[in-house]
């Protein structure tokens, strides 16, 4: 097992242990976070605990609390060849989860487990479920057969239909992201207070644009300073350097600066995205415990009161579009302006 998996396991254990300990394992779980691979690992881990043949730890009522990771069941669950753990992923070029594959899943989950104690169905990228597929699924999601567990995985939970969302217990596995956004907390608070203070008028949007541009300039300056202070040009400043070599160094430094700037800009926008995700969560009943920025709950709940859940969802999509556009040739300023003008608040 890799270090990465171990680290992931630790986090996941915390969430699952509570559920397993109390014998309160829900019928359907939604695992969400920033990384599909990690979410799949978590789903496999839970499926292994439920079906392990030699569980190292058992609860008072006899349920497994840990898996051995080496028995035949554990190994086959890892390889996705275990008959009682059923996987579906988006198909075809459209990356859709079709109504046919959902019907197949429903059939599959009605059958008694072949080998293990639990039937587990994992739907990867559940947000790609076609509307018909989602509708076909609601009844099973609400009343799944005994000893079955449905796990939905998504990195974009707001794209799920509210009817699906409300039927799942949600587990947020994005702790590392949360640590990362802490560095932008003050900035996010500034954004939140600006949104709260401005009405629907355009002026508020441009104030927000100013704030973002200022922050991006700050980031670019920092990156430039960092990279040029370590450049060979600086290190050999007392030596005469061939102009061609010098030119090559300058070119290299420029592309280094650009790529580092883009990376940090992405981090910043991810953090802003979290703020908008919190605002969206605040429009949903009983979702407060899932906030990424509980310190800003006061702001996000007040903003949420000003908009509809649909608007909050739309804002998240607008920010996703914005981040996708950063990977194209469209000018940064234009992307920011369009993004801010589209936002609903
Ligand atoms: Zn095992």
Image (cartoon, grey):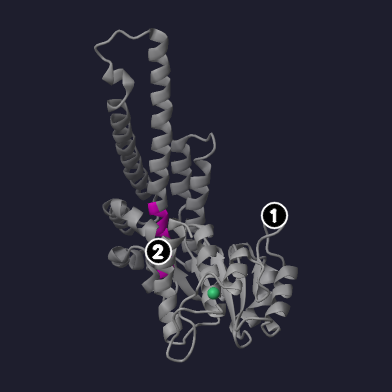
In percent of the image, x 49 and y 86: which residue is there?
63
Instruction: Please name the residue that numbered disc 1 is placed on.
Output: 94
x%, y% of residue 19? Answer: 44, 81
Q: Does the rendering let one see residue 158?
A: no
Q: Main secondary structure of the magenta part?
A: helix
Magenta residues, start to end:
271-282
Q: Is residue 320 above or below residue 257?
A: below
Q: Is residue 224 above or below residue 277?
A: above
Q: Does the rendering let one see residue 111?
A: yes
In percent of the image, x 35 and y 47: which residue is there?
208
Residue 273 is covered by the magenta coloring:
yes
Identity of the residue furthest to the left in this view: 238
In percent of the image, x 39 and y 19: which residue is there?
249
x%, y% of residue 286? Answer: 41, 77
Helix, strand or loop status at disc 1: loop
In the rendered structure, find residue 279 and report the number of the disc placed on it: 2
Q: How many numbered marks have been drawn onto this rendered protein structure?
A: 2
x%, y% of residue 20? Answer: 45, 82
Dot 1 or dot 2: first in sequence order is: 1
């Amino acid at each position: 097992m890799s270090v990465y998996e171990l680290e992931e396991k630790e986090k996941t254990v915390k969430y699952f242990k509570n559920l397993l300990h109390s014998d309160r394992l829900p019928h359907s779980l939604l695992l969400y976070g920033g990384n599909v691979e990690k979410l799949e690992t978590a789903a496999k881990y839970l499926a292994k605990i439920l079906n392990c043949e030699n569980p190292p730890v058992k609860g008072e009522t006899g349920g497994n609390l840990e898996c051995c990771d080496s028995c035949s069941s554990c190994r086959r669950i890892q390889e996705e060849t275990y008959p009682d753990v059923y996987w579906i992923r988006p198909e075809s070029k459209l990356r859709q989860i079709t109504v046919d594959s959902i019907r197949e899943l429903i059939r599959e989950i009605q059958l008694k487990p072949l080998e293990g104690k639990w039937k587990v169905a994992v739907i990867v990228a559940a947000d790609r479920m076609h509307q018909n597929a989602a509708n076909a699924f609601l009844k099973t999601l609400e009343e799944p057969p005994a000893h079955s567990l449905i796990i939905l995985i998504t990195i974009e939970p707001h794209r799920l239909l509210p009817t699906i969302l409300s039927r799942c217990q949600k587990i947020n596995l994005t702790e590392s992201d949360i640590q990362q956004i802490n560095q932008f907390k003050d900035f996010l608070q500034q954004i939140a207070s600006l949104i709260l203070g401005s009405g629907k008028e355009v002026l508020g949007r441009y104030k927000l644009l100013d704030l973002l541009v200022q922050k991006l300039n700050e980031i670019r300056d920092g990156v430039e300073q960092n990279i040029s202070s370590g450049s060979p040009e600086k290190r050999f400043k007392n030596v005469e350097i061939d102009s061609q070599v010098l030119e090559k160094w300058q070119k290299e430094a420029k592309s280094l600066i650009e790529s580092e700037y883009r990376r940090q800009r992405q981090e910043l926008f991810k953090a802003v995205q979290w703020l908008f995700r919190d605002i969206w969560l605040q429009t949903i009943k009983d979702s407060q415990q899932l906030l990424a920025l509980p310190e800003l709950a006061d702001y996000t709940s007040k903003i949420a009161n000003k908009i509809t859940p649909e608007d909050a969802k739309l804002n998240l999509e607008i920010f996703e579009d914005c981040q996708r556009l950063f990977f194209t040739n469209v000018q940064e300023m234009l992307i920011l302006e369009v993004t801010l003008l589209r936002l609903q608040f």
